[in-house]
Amino acid sequence: MSVLESKIVREMVETMSNMYRLGWNERNGGNISCLLNETELDMMLPKKMIKRQIALDFDVAKLMGKYFLVTGSGHYFKNAAKNPEEVLGIVRVGGGGLDLLWGLEDGANPTSELPTHFMSHMARLEQDANHRIIMHSHATHLLAMSFTHSLKEEDFTKTLWKMCTECIIVFPEGIGILPWLMPGSNEIGMETAKKMETCRLVLWPYHGIYGAGCSFDETFGLIETAEKAAQIYSYVRAQGGIKQTISTQELKDLAAVFGVVPRKGVLD
Ligand code: 2HA
Ligand code: ZN
């Protein structure tokens, strides 16, 4: 089976096309990385020939020997379906940095947000052995909300939970929020990864959102659910503000019925 025929690559391309279509990934905005398992890799790239090597300036010892499908720096989600060999790459974490095994045909490097991706993968793998995906997008309404809403995590979380009944079930741990930090830096990588120890959603104010999960559907669905809540919040504000809403007790009841533990400090 070729790389392009594999289920995981088809899912990545389909997800990127959906994200573009939703307006979350304009131009070269956003990036995704997916941890590949050995079986997938052996089917796609039995020879594992190294095309070129890429240096890294942060510690990835915990990911040594792991393979990732990544988006390329400067590439557009819009073009993923048309030019997957240019937009995507498969890399292996080696001693001296990354070994590129497939893709990034025009010489691009993996995403400029690689520190955040790799540090977040390390943080999520500590929490969940099935973790696989880190996804970043400039989801419109979440980004807008970062200008108008309190950036206290408990406040932001509670507002999102109240906008759609399913939110507390989909992300009971709430949302992590960073201060504004320089994109692409090791610092934003470390701070995002710290939040990822307890949250699968991390908001970068005035920039975008990060999501983590075990499959493309789950990770995309997580961002999609939070973004939908932010969209409703935008409409509610535009329609003159909240007249009535889900009560705190109803949120507690929802959590109990669906067997999730809501983040402490939000409902009490
Ligand atoms: O890859 O979204 O955060 C472009 C970006 C940087
Ligand atoms: Zn971005």
Image (cartoon, helix red, strand yellow):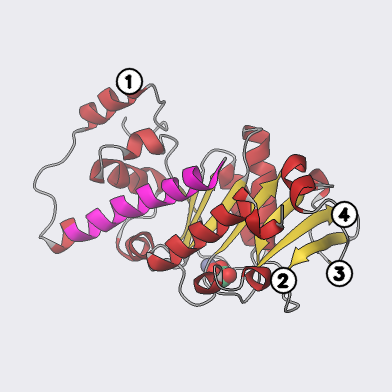
Specify start and end residues of the magenta stretch as a single range. 215-235
Q: In which quarter of the image is ligand 1?
A: bottom right
| Amino acid type, label 2 | Leu
Quadrant location of the C terminus in the rendered image:
top left
| Amino acid type, label 4 | Lys
| Residue corresponding to mark 4 | 47
| Residue corresponding to mark 3 | 52
Residue 124 is situated, as x and y percent measured from the top left of the image, at 63, 40
Q: Nearer the viewer, residue 238 or 108?
A: 108
Q: Which of marks 4 and 1 is nearer the N terminus?
A: 4
Q: Which of 174 and 224 is in front in this view?
A: 224
| Amino acid type, label 3 | Arg
Q: How crowded is mark 4: few (under 14 residues within 10 Å), some or many (20 or more)?
A: few
Q: Distance between the residues labelled 3 and 4?
A: 15 Å
Q: Which mark is residue 104?
A: 2
Judge whether 149 appears above or below 83 on screen.
above
